[in-house]
């Protein structure tokens, strides 16, 4: 029996020649499919960071770690015989007095909370139908560290640079003095200006109102006494309110 094997037919030779070529195509296709981004998992989106909102009033935004809440119980309550209407919440921007500029709104980044309330008062014994005598706006700031005493320091400097200002178009003067026996430290500002009628005409007299600022530990409270419709405030009532308010603020912080 002969060991010689005859060569394969031409058709078989062509098929055998295609085998390596088909293997190459399969490998190339597999590589292409592996690297196709449409078949891979979607990439994790980059984390987004929201920009901090800026308070248009200029008040600082306290950090979450130091943010506090000021309850209604921290504010002074007028005795019934002096209360014309119940106290109500007010925006800090509207409650703070303004002289030459924003002297009382300089709390800075150490402010941890702020709130304000307004009460309308009357003279003791007045009938309910009588016109109120005035309103007192009370603002409370709480601070981190030495922020409260630093605020009083800036305020002293600011009001010292403002001995006079324009009050509803009329010249007004400001006198500042210490207010002893109130909190840890306190200031009293007295404003004087020409009194005017409801029509804006000068009456020939002078009107007076006061602002009191007291620090109690890490908190500061500002009282702005405004006489009704531009008339004089009541210094006796304000003095009582300030002293009671400092005690109320002290009790809240204990």
Image: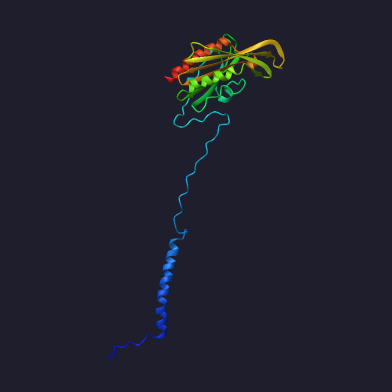
For the C terminus, which image quadrant? top left
Q: Position of residue 68 (x, y in %)?
A: 46, 27
Task: Report the residue at 43% width, 64% height from top.
Answer: 31
Q: How is the image coloured?
A: rainbow
- Can you see residue 26? yes
Q: 85 or 162: which is nearer to us? A: 162
Q: How many dots with numbers?
A: 0
Q: Taking 66 as reference, is 208 above or below it? A: above
Q: Is residue 19 left or right of residue 168?
A: left
- Can you see residue 232? no
Residue most extreme to the left: 1
Q: Is residue 79 left or right of residue 99?
A: left
Task: Report the residue at 67% width, 16% height from top.
Answer: 171
Displayed quadrant of residue 32:
bottom left
Task: Report the residue at 44% width, 67% height from top.
Answer: 29
Q: Position of residue 118 (x, y in %)?
A: 56, 20
Q: Position of residue 10 (x, y in %)?
A: 41, 85
For the N terminus, which image quadrant? bottom left
Q: Taking 210 as reference, is 93 above or below it? A: below
Q: Position of residue 117 (x, y in %)?
A: 54, 21
Residue most extreme to the bottom: 1
Q: 60 or 90: which is nearer to us? A: 60
Q: 89 or 68: which is nearer to us? A: 68
Q: 200 or 29: which is nearer to us? A: 29
């Amino acid at each position: 029996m002969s060991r010689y094997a005859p060569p394969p037919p031409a058709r078989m030779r062509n098929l055998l020649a295609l085998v390596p070529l088909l293997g190459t195509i399969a490998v190339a296709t597999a590589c292409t499919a592996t690297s196709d981004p449409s078949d891979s998992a979607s990439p994790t989106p980059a984390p987004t960071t929201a920009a901090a909102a800026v308070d248009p009033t200029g008040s600082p935004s306290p950090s979450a770690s130091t943010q506090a809440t000021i309850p209604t119980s921290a504010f002074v309550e007028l005795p019934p015989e002096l209360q014309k209407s119940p106290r109500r919440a007010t925006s800090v921007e509207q409650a703070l007095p303004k002289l030459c500029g924003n002297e009382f709104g300089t709390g800075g980044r150490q402010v941890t909370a702020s709130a304000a309330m307004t009460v309308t008062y009357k003279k003791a014994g007045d009938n309910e139908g009588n016109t109120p005598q005035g309103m007192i706006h009370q603002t409370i700031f709480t601070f981190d560290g030495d922020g409260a005493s630093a605020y009083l320091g800036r305020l002293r400097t600011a009001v010292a640079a403002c001995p006079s200002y324009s009050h509803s178009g009329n010249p007004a003067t400001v006198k500042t003095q210490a207010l002893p026996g109130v909190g840890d430290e306190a200031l009293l500002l007295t404003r004087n200006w020409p009194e005017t009628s409801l029509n804006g005409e000068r009456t020939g007299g002078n009107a007076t109102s006061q602002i009191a600022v007291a620090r109690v530990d890490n908190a500061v409270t500002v009282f702005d006494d405004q006489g009704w419709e531009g008339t004089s405030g009541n210094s006796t009532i304000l003095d009582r309110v300030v002293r009671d308010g400092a005690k109320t603020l002290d009790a809240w912080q204990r």
